[in-house]
Image: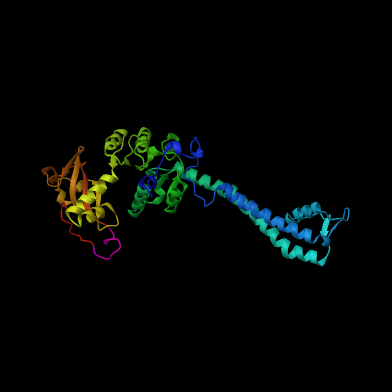
Amino acid sequence: MSEAKQIDRIVPDKQPRSYRGPKFRPLRRATKLPVWGDLGIRLGAALFLIFIVIMVHWWDREGLVDNLDGEVSFLDVIYFTMISITTTGFGDIAPISDRARLVEAVIVTPIRFAVFFIFVGTAYNFIIKRSWEKFRMARIQEKLSGHIVVLGFGISGSEAVGELVERGTDPSCIVVIDPSEERLADAEALGCNVMAADATRDETLKAVRISEAQNVLISAGRDDTTILITLTVRALAPNVPISVVVRADDNESLARQAGANNVINPVRFTGLLLAGSAKGEHIAEYLADLASVSGRVQLVEREVTDEECGCAISELESGGRGLRIYRNGRAIGFWEDECQNLQKGDVIVEIVATPNGTTKGDGHVKDDTIRQGS
């Protein structure tokens, strides 16, 4: 399968008709079958059971008596079946033979209960349960704040959500928007809130309270769609950090102009790993280790604490190894003089040991002495 088919897409002109209008179902729960498919199966099962009872009554019509004209026609059998299953019982048609009464007790009565439970279950599922779920999800939607919105749940988006969950993010604080029902089912399995909608539309983003989000991650699969979504998000949420994935170098500057704070190019990152592996067999492994929470070490970005002000970057309270600081929008390396005197407002990028102390898949103890600059 080509990469173009594997990556996630949020393309407005290819959305199903139900996603084009201003109304949709935010934060819904996925079902294994479509609503009308589920309803059709239930009704089909009920009608099949009723058909069986009609055939049984028609086969044993000699055991029935019609108190009006003394004859039991096929229409009388249908009528008797319906009033028998619904336990109405007018008494105009009744079983009189022992065999007919045995059929009513052994065959018709269990079918009567089965049909009853089918209709009760259908009423519960389609009226009570769905109404309650809609009400509950609407309340969740109204209270969304400080959440992470993921626009696109393809390869990049799903990996990002999985990594966030591994890093300790509560899945209930993650909202995933994607037009694909299959991909949304995977997101729901992780415990995320999901919405099947077009992420380029204002009403979609307003429904998930985009302006109250903590972060927005965009991975639309196509650079033009990604940039369009970025423009829409930035217009609605001027202060929310936005991270996007683009695949063409010349689109990185466009994504930043559209309002993205972080632009990630997976093709370039792959090239860095390949180039690093050419210089040493462990460089690519270490870079992947840094990028994943499941590795032995990880990169952390945070603000300088009050206790660290005036200290050198090599004297961090966290015990990590500081690599650089960001001061007034400028990146300063650990070897530069400014890093020997941390100031309030500085943002530190450091390497720290992962909390579990082991590498994923092995039992080696984590190295607590990570060399500065490694």
Residue 289 position within the rendered picture, expressed as x and y whole percent measured from the top left = 25, 55
In the rendered view, would you say 11 is above or below 78?
Answer: above
**Residue 164, image x and y in percent?**
34, 51
Seen in the image, is 98 located left or right of residue 236? right
Q: Is residue 95 visible?
A: no
Q: Is 363 placed left or right of 191 in the picture?
A: left
Residue interval drawn in magenta: 355-365
Q: Quadrant location of residue 240?
A: top left
Describe residue 358's horizontal placement relative to residue 64 as left or right. left
- What colour scheme has been applied to the protein in the rendered image? rainbow
In the rendered image, residue 100, in percent from the top left (x then y), is placed at 79, 64
Query: Which residue shows up at 26% across the image and 48% down it?
Result: 270
Q: Position of residue 151 (x, y in %)?
A: 39, 42
Q: Nearer the viewer, residue 347 or 287?
A: 287
Q: Is residue 101 visible?
A: yes
Residue 250, placed above or below residue 131: above
In the current view of this chain or complex, which residue is farthest to the right?
69
Q: How many marks?
A: 0
Residue 209 shown in magenta: no
Magenta: main secondary structure: loop
